Image (spheres, coloured by chain):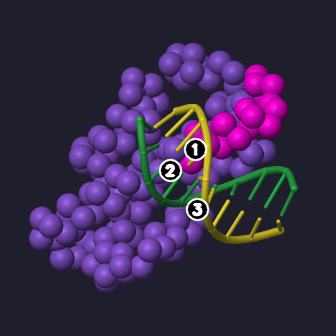
Chain colours: A purple, B yellow, C green
Amino acid sequence: MFFYTRYPSSNMLKMFFSDVKFNRCITSQLIKWFSNFREFYYIQMEKFARQAINDGATGTEELSVSRDSELYRALNMHYNKANDFEVPERFLEVAQITLREFFNAIVAGKDVDPSWKKAIYKVICKLDSEVPEIFKSPNCLQELLHE
DNA sequence: CGGGAACCTG
DNA sequence: CAGGTTCCCG
C-alpha cells in the first residue's frame, strides 16, 4: 500500500483492512506502521541525495529513479521483499521528486535549519495516489499472486 | 519494526 | 484533550 500512499488516513486504513476489528490500539499501531515506513523512506532519500552530491552531481536533472536504481532496490527490498507486488510507475515518480527535493534543499544549505525536512514532507504528502480496490480484499495477496 | 517521549493541530 | 507525527533508541 505504501507504494500508493505515504500518508493514509485512519479511515482509509480501516477500509483497506476490513478483516481487522479496529480498536484504539490497533488503529494507532497501523498508523505507526506507516510512520515507520515514511521514516525509512525519507532516510534513504536523504542518504542517496547526499551521496549524489558527494559524487559530484550538480543538477537535479542528473537524479532519476528507475527500476534499476540502487535507491529503488533499497526501497523495494524493504517494502516488497518477496517481490509480490508490481511497483506502480507513479511510485518511481514520487521517489524521484522526493530525491530531487532533498537534493535541492541540501545544495541550498537548508539542512542547517533543524526543521528543514518539514517543507519536503509537505510536498510529498500531496503526492498520494489512490490505492487499487483489490487491496481492500482480505485475500489480496493471494489474488495478486494469481494475476 | 515496536516503544515511548515530545510535539503539533483541531 | 485526542489523534497524528516525528524523533530517537534498541
Residue at image coords 50%, 44%: A37
Task: Answer with the quarter of the image where residue A72 lies.
Answer: top left
**Which residue is rendered at x = 65% and y = 30% of the image?**
A134
Q: Chain of mark 3?
A: A
Q: Which residue is identified by label 2?
A: A38
Question: Residue flagged by tag 3: what amino acid is it?
Answer: Cys
Q: Is residue A74 left or right of residue A4?
A: left
Residue A32 horizontal/vertical position (percent): 61, 43
Letter of the chain that mark 1 sits on in the rendering: A
> Which is more N-terminal, label 3 or label 2?
2
Assign the magenta stretch its main secondary structure: helix
> Do the numbered discs 1 and 2 sit on residues whose CB atoms are within 8 Å?
yes
Q: Total label count?
A: 3
Labelled disc at residue A125: 3
Return the chain for callout 2: A
Residue A58 occupies which quadrant of the picture? bottom left
